[in-house]
Amino acid sequence: MSKQENILQQQLTEREEKGLLRKLTNLNLPFDFCSNDYLGFARSEELQKNIEQEVKKHKTKNGAGGSRLLSGNTAYTEETEQFIADFHQAESGLIFNSGYDANIGLLSSVPQRGDTIISDELIHASLIDGIRLSHANRLKFKHNNTDDLENKLKTTLGNRFVVVESVYSMNGDTAPLVEIAKICKQYNANLIVDEAHSTGIFGRQGRGLVQQLNLEKEVFASVVTFGKALGIHGAIVLGSSILRDYLINFSRSFIYTTAAPLHNIIAVKKAYLMLAQSDKHLLINKKIELYNQLIQPIKQCITPSDSAIQTIVFNNNKSTKAAAQHLQQNGFDVKAILSPTVPEGAERLRICLHTYNSDEEIKELVNHLKNIH
């Protein structure tokens, strides 16, 4: 073992001793309450058929062969970007290879030295990493605390950006976007909203929480990912045409990466068409309502959530892992979320609801949760 490998092994051993070592698993349990496939699009045979039929109409290559600025751009991609922008009632949009790439590319390039980014303390790691790569000043405000946000805005000068998620991925709770947008407007701050876990669940035809609250014109940029409710892969940054042109010129995670192949863009377009033509968002909300009704006896241990993400807080690693193992042994794919993914003392089960979870499966899951908590 080399000196460097020894250093790495020591860090892995330390994490294992704390019960925090991450490992890949390939569980194939009968009841999925883990994935982000909220609407069942990732397993949809209808969507798969629609994609295959469209691929046959086009001369698709195995790969793009280069970045969008070299050989990887197509008219179909640009048409899809505009289609998605229109769907979300935005002026323009730019597709990235993943939600991580989109957040990195947006936040590392737009805020400049001397600007200030003020973010909710519970934003996703991809947003945090994008902010770290920026040369702007960085501040946090207490989770969903609009008073703390306003106090931070009062103490800063210059160009400011406020970064939030519409639905928080580890809590399942929603941001008070109306109040946040109002404060941003008052202090002339630019609001950036990650809609990853909101798309497909909230708004007319699943357009997201920004659209449901009629805040499209109050948001500087929003990020929509395709790997959750849409069941595909990739993401798009929505905003003005000026923002799109700027990202094409200055966003390194867009410029310096091979473009997604055309068949991936076709999959995105077909997923959006299915979303627009279905009532899946109504069905998932019925599942959410059922779960919330059933879970009431242990409501003191949950974070209130109207989203597809639900949590049961155990406050320590040992009991959280034991609860997850009990559920998995009974066929329920539920994962334990441990620190540092969540703060120490806030360890929890993260439960994702889907249109394909039967009412009986949800009832049985809740019965197990009541017994183990």
Image (tube, rainbow, N blue to C red):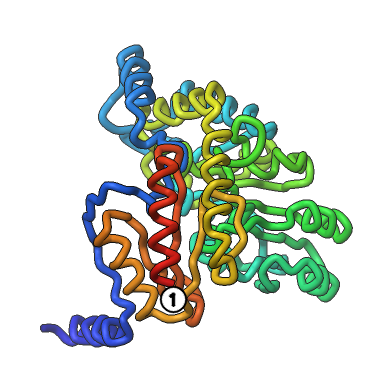
* Extreme-right residue of the structure: 186
- Residue for point 24% across, 61% down: 329
Closest to the observer, 90 or 169: 169
Residue drawn where x is 55% and y is 30% of the image: 81
Q: Quarter of the image holding residue 167?
A: bottom right
Residue lying furthest left? 1
* Amino acid type of the residue that numbered disc 1 sits on in the rendered structure: Pro
Give the vertical position of 140 relative to 163 (above or below): below
- Spot occupied by residue 41 in the image (x, y as percentages of width and height): 41, 34
- Residue 233: x, y in percent? 40, 40
175 relative to 367 in the view: left or right: right
Judging by the rendered image, the residue that carries numbered circle 1 is 340
In this rendering, is residue 196 above or below 156? Answer: above
Residue at (48, 81) in percent of width and height:
344
Horizontally, residue 198 falls left or right of residue 60, namely right
**How many numbered discs, if any?**
1
Q: Can residue 233 be spotted in the picture?
A: no
Q: Is residue 341 visible?
A: yes
Residue that appears at 44% across and 72% down: 373
For the N terminus, the quadrant is: bottom left
Tell me which corner region of the image, top left, top right, bottom left or bottom right, holds residue 61.
top left
**Of residues 78 and 236, the one drawn nearer to the viewer in this rendering:** 236
Identify the element where label 1 is drawn: loop
The percent position of residue 21, horizontal first and vertical second, equals 29, 76
From this view, report whether residue 112 is shown above or below residue 290.
below
Which x, y percent locates residue 134?
58, 65
Q: Nearer the viewer, residue 205 or 348?
A: 348
